[in-house]
Amino acid sequence: MFDLDLLQSFVSVVDAGGFTRAGERVNRTQSTVSQQIRRLEDGLGRPLFHRDRRRIALTEAGETLLGYARRLLALAGEARQALVGQPAPAVVRLGIPEDFAVTALTGVIASFAAARPDIRLEVRCDLSVALRDGLTRGLYDLVLAKREPGQGPAFGAWPERLVWAAGAGHAPAGGGDPLPLVTFLSGCLYRERAIRALEAAGRRWRIAYESPNLAGVQAAVAGGLGIALLEAGTVGPGLQALGPAQGLPPIPPTELALMRRPDAPEGAIDLCGTISDFCSRKATENRIDAR
């Protein structure tokens, strides 16, 4: 027999991407969650996770158990609802890119959550490549992510204007020296776009600074460590936009897409509409600013 408490911790580790964050979700310490996963693995006689210092990943047995665990927990919730007479809140798991108007978007999401107590939101910021992969693997119900234009179906999609950015007073020097780049981590769409464009233009480059988040990239660029390819709306104070006048190649637009799992709970559809309205307003503001 499966212990539902152990299954809940197992699903939380998968959804949170680690034991520490999972503990925060289920109000337990990291060591307690680790012990629960060990108990579950001992009972099954096989490991559920590949573990290393940088990340965890499901084994084949873990992938098999995940779908059953979600169904067992959902069925237990339905039984509790039928007996107690109170509807359990629908859980909607949302993934958003860290570098897209995150402060304003978080405010919109918080307002939605306050207006819909029947929905329990679980939100995570990450690189778009990880968000899209998580949607495919069933880790999210709804994802807002950057991608190449027209790359599959979406609830809504909006073009992104990309520009080269440097610190104020730190325009790149010419000559034969490699151009120092400030980038997000490997797998980022902007990073790949920047490298491809420079190589196509015959411009030498080197990675001078890498950061997993927008704040780190902006700080490095503002400090003069290099230039970065950013969405135009994130070129804030202390930064300047560059282009062909500085010998840099133009970059075609990328796309911000809102994608939803076909079997996502009903509340995800309502949240889609809220986020879509917000993205449409931002896209309109960006077109006005570009003029």
Image (cartoon, rainbow, N blue to C red):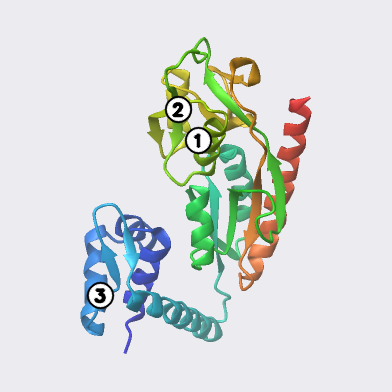
Label 1 SS: helix
Q: As drawn, is 268 to the left or to the right of 95?
A: right
Looking at the image, do the residues carrying marks 2 and 1 touch, with CB atoms under 8 Å apart? yes
Q: Give x and y (percent) for residue 168.
A: 53, 13
Q: Which residue, given by chain and number where applicable, does mark 2 sit on?
A: 181
Residue type indicated by callout 3: Pro
Is residue 278 in sight in this rendering?
Answer: no
Looking at the image, do the residues carrying marks 3 and 1 touch, with CB atoms under 8 Å apart? no
Q: Residues within 10 Å of mark 1 (few under 14, many from 20)?
A: some
Q: Give x and y (percent) for residue 197.
A: 57, 34
Residue type indicated by callout 1: Ile
User: Which is closer to the viewer, label 3 or label 1?
Assistant: 1
Q: Residues within 10 Å of mark 3 (few under 14, many from 20)?
A: some
Q: Residues within 10 Å of mark 2 (few under 14, many from 20)?
A: many
Is residue 65 in sight in this rendering?
Answer: yes
Q: Nearer the viewer, residue 278 or 78?
A: 278
Label 3 SS: loop
Q: Residue at x 26, y 84 (%)?
A: 44
Q: Look at the picture and state if 55 lies above or below 60.
A: above
Q: Earlier in the sequence, mark 2 or mark 1?
A: 2
Looking at the image, do the residues carrying marks 3 and 2 touch, with CB atoms under 8 Å apart? no
